[in-house]
Image: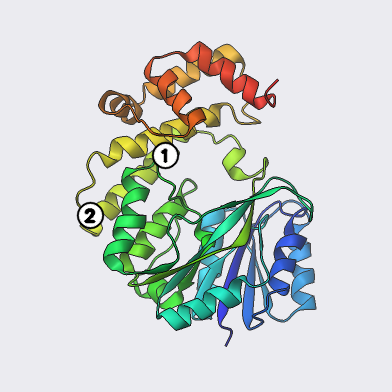
C-alpha cells in the first residue's frame, strides 16, 4: 500500500501537466500513488494522463464521462485513494522534490493528523520564472484542536477580507481516516476548498507546521479563479449556505458578524468577476452590473453593517469606492489594471 495518495483534477491542462506530474515523479519519497482525474477535458490532457499511467504503475487515471467541475473530480480521487495520507495538487502547480518526504516524516514524528507548509507564488513557467515565498499563516510548531479552530476555522469564516488564511488545500498533508470517518467531501464551484478546510480542521486533532515552502503555486491568468463565472450571486449563496451549515454543525461561537465579512469577500470577488477576461461587457454595462450586484440582499446588508478596514492597499481602495458608490472611478481603475497598468 502506498503511503500517500496524490489527487490531481485535470481540465485543459495540456500545457502545464508535465511540470505537475514530473514534480511528483521526482519526489524523494517514492512510495506514493497519483490519481489523475481527467474531468472530460476537451484538449489533449486525457491522452497525456494515459501516457503517464503507461510509463509508471503508481499513476492511475480516472476519465470522467462529462465535465462536472473540480469538486466532483476531487471526490472521485478520494473514492479511489488507498493510502493513509492524502495530498492534493492542482494541474498547473508543482511540488519541490522533498515535499512529501518532509511532510510525511513531520506527521510521524509529531503524531499529527495533518501537516502544513509555506509555498511560492510563481508568475511564469520554467526554471527562471519569478517566484516569491509566501510565509505560512502559522509558524512552525504543533497545534491542538482549540488552536485549529481559532487560527484556521474562525478566520475562514469571520476575517475573510483581511485574513491571510485561505483555501489553499494543497499546502497540507491530510489523514485519510479523518476525511472518511467524518464523511468530508467537496461540493460547489466557489470556495469549495475553504468549506473542505473548515470541515477537516473541525474534525482533526493535531496539526504540525513546517517553515519551508514546498509547493509552487502558479498564478495562472487562465485558471478558473480568473475566468468569468456566470450567475455569480447564486454561486456565492450556495457557498454562504454551506458555511452557515458548518457554523451550526460544529457549534462555532464568538464569530461576531461573520456573515457580513464573508459577504464582503464575496462582493469583492463578484466585482472582479465582472471584469474578468471573457465577460464581454462594455464599461457602462459593467457599472450597471456592479450596481445590480450591490443591490443583492446579502451584499446590500453587508455594506450597511460593515465597512472593512485593514485590507491590503488595492483591496482597501476597492472597498472604499464601493462604500461611497464611486462606481465610475472603480470602473476606470479596473480597466487600467486589466490593461497592465497603462
Q: Secondary structure at mark 1?
A: helix
Q: Which residue is mark 2?
A: 252
Q: Is 200 placed above or below 57 here? A: above
Using residue 76 as the reference point, say whether residue 162 is left or right of it: left
Q: Nearer the viewer, residue 211 or 309?
A: 211
**Dot 1 surroundings within 10 Å: few (below 14), some, or many (20 or more)?**
many
At horizontal 35% and vertical 39% (from top left) the residue drawn is 262
Residue 146 tag number: none
Place residue 81 in its image quadrant. Answer: bottom right
Q: Residue furthest bottom?
A: 1
Using residue 282 as the reference point, say whether residue 327 is left or right of it: left
Distance from the alpha carbon under mark 2 to that under mark 1: 21 Å
Residue 323 in sight from this viewpoint: yes
At horizontal 75% and vertical 49% (from top left) the residue drawn is 129
Q: Is 10 placed above or below 55 here? A: above
- The image position of residue 140, as x and y in percent, is 45, 65
At horizontal 71% and vertical 51% (from top left) the residue drawn is 12
Place residue 227 in its image quadrant. Answer: top right
Reading the chain from its start, which is encountered first: label 2 or label 1? 1
Amino acid at each position: 500500500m502506498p503511503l500517500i495518495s496524490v489527487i490531481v483534477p485535470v481540465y485543459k491542462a495540456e500545457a502545464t501537466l508535465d511540470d505537475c506530474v514530473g514534480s511528483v515523479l521526482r519526489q524523494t519519497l517514492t512510495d506514493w500513488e497519483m490519481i489523475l482525474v481527467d474531468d472530460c477535458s476537451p484538449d489533449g490532457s486525457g491522452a497525456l494522463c494515459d501516457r503517464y499511467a503507461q510509463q509508471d504503475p503508481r499513476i492511475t487515471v480516472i476519465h470522467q464521462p462529462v465535465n462536472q467541475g473540480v469538486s466532483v473530480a476531487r471526490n472521485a480521487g478520494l473514492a479511489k485513494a488507498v493510502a493513509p495520507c492524502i495530498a492534493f495538487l492542482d494541474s498547473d502547480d508543482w511540488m519541490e522534490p522533498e515535499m512529501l518526504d518532509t511532510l510525511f516524516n513531520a506527521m510521524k514524528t509529531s503524531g499529527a493528523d495533518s501537516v502544513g507548509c509555506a509555498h511560492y507564488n510563481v508568475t511564469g513557467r520554467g526554471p527562471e520564472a519569478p517566484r516569491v515565498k509566501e510565509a505560512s499563516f502559522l509558524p512552525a510548531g504543533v497545534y491542538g484542536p482549540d488552536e485549529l479552530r481559532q487560527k484556521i476555522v474562525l478566520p475562514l469564516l469571520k476575517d475573510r477580507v483581511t485574513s491571510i488564511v485561505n483555501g489553499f488545500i494543497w499546502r497540507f498533508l491530510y489523514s485519510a481516516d479523518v476525511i472518511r470517518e467524518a464523511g468530508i467531501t467537496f461540493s460547489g464551484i466557489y470556495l469549495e476548498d475553504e468549506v473542505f478546510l473548515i470541515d477537516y480542521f473541525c474534525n482533526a486533532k493535531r496539526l504540525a507546521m513546517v517553515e519551508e515552502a514546498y509547493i509552487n503555486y502558479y498564478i495562472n491568468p487562465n485558471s478558473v479563479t480568473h475566468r468569468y463565472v456566470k450567475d455569480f450571486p447564486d454561486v456565492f449563496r450556495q457557498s454562504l449556505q454551506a458555511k452557515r451549515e458548518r457554523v451550526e454543525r460544529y457549534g462555532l461561537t464568538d464569530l461576531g458578524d461573520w456573515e457580513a465579512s464573508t459577504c464582503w469577500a464575496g462582493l469583492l470577488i463578484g466585482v472582479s468577476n465582472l471584469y474578468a477576461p471573457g465577460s464581454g461587457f462594455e464599461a457602462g454595462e459593467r457599472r450597471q452590473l456592479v450596481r445590480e450586484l450591490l443591490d443583492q440582499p446579502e451584499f446590500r446588508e453587508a455594506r450597511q453593517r460593515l465597512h472593512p478596514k485593514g485590507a491590503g492597499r488595492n483591496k482597501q481602495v476597492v472597498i472604499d469606492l464601493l462604500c461611497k458608490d464611486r462606481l465610475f472611478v472603480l470602473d476606470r481603475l479596473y480597466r487600467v489594471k486589466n490593461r497592465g497598468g497603462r
